[in-house]
Image (cartoon, grey):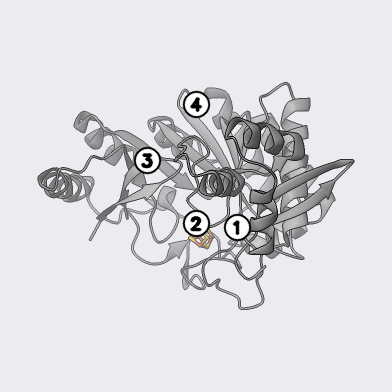
Amino acid sequence: MIAFGPVPSRRLGRSLGINNIPPKICTYSCVYCQLGNTLRMRVEREAFYAPEQILQDVQNKIEKVKETGETIDYLTFVPDGEPTLDVNLGRAIDLLKPLGIKIAVITNSSLIWQEAVRRDLLKADWVSLKMDAVRQEVWRKVNRPHGKLELTAILDGALEFARTFKGELATETMLVAGVNDHDDDIRAVADFVARLSPATAYLSIPTRPPAEAWVHSPAEPVINRAYQIFSERLEAHGQPPAVEYLIGYEGNAFAFTGDVEQDILSITSVHPMREDAVSDFLTRAGADWSVIHGLIAQEQMIELQYGDKKFYMRKLRGG
Ligand code: SF4
């Protein structure tokens, strides 16, 4: 099945997934990959499914979704592998465009040094670039790239793409404990991400069983620190510090339910809240700090110190 879903996604609303790569063909073999180790590593682009077949599959799926009265916000290329390995990606996007639904591509960025790949991605409305590391040794450790790939070319390609892309650009940085979560590495990635000027820089952690059993999420203080460093670096580059977590809770900081506990948990699953912001929120909701103390006691929330400020964030499962 090429088209699947739609699945609810905080980033993309109701997203109909497009699996344009047979499992699991990738340019990377990330230590945290939820699809397991990459058995078929490739760097040459190939033709997999005919773009007409992709269109047909997506159209069939849309018809079925319509019958149930559901809606679709995005058609998202998010295959069991790297979507830009598909030499027909651009043609598939061209065929899907007339359906009138926005198109998203979630790529690991590894082939973005190729002009043809950038050309294909420019056709999309929303693109997410994976940016886990900007230093050779860390990149090799976390993404375990195909031997023919070069990091500097990838970073240059990403900058070139970001300069010309008219749609909404996002970045995603997966933090793995002991691999790319050192402050220096986070700072280096944050500085690079800032140069890309993404609409949102997402920080994620492994929440599903990873390819390597030793892979773990960093602890909350590190994740909070990463958030603060990214925010500072984006701001220093003159950008809004639009940093959000993807930590396994589909929180939505913008949809309030009126239930103070739930709303605080939703917000803090998207980003940590500073003490004064929590105070303001509680006051506006007519509640007091007992709500927060209760959530901390239930181990749903955690209090953290960064610089001279206190922050509150969602406690990670098993963290
Ligand atoms: S880029 Fe994505 S599909 Fe490829 S190995 Fe990494 S996590 Fe898995």
Q: Which residue has dot 3 on it?
A: 13
Residue at 71 percent across and 53 percent down: it is: 223
Q: Residue 82: x and y, percent?
A: 45, 55
Q: Which residue has dot 1 on it?
A: 148
Residue at disc 3, secondary structure: strand
Q: Residue 200: x and y, percent?
A: 57, 35
Q: Is residue 103 left or right of residue 137?
A: left
Kind of residue at badge 2 = Val
Please state which of the two labelled residues, at mark 2 or mark 4, is closer to the viewer: 4
Residue at 40 percent across and 61 percent down: it is: 80
Which of the pair 286/49 is nearer the observer? 286
In primary-sequence order, the first of circles 2 and 1 is 2
Whether the residues at callouts 2 and 1 have beta carbons within 8 Å, the answer is yes
Q: Residues within 10 Å of mark 4 (few under 14, many from 20)?
A: some
Q: Is residue 194 above or below residue 40?
A: above
Cα distance between the residues tagged 4 and 3: 21 Å
Q: Is residue 17 above or below residue 91?
A: below
Residue at disc 1, secondary structure: loop
In primary-sequence order, the first of circles 1 and 3 is 3
Quadrant in which the N terminus is drawn? bottom left
Residue at disc 2, secondary structure: loop
Q: Which residue has dot 2 on it?
A: 43
Please state which of the two labelled residues, at mark 1 or mark 3, is closer to the viewer: 3
Please state which of the two labelled residues, at mark 2 or mark 3, is closer to the viewer: 3
Cα distance between the residues tagged 2 and 4: 23 Å
Q: Residue 206: x and y, percent?
A: 58, 63
Judge whether residue 134 can be spotted in this image.
no
Cα distance between the residues tagged 2 and 1: 7 Å
Q: Ligand 1 within 8 A of label 2's CB?
A: no
Q: Which residue has dot 4 on it?
A: 165
Kind of residue at badge 4 = Phe
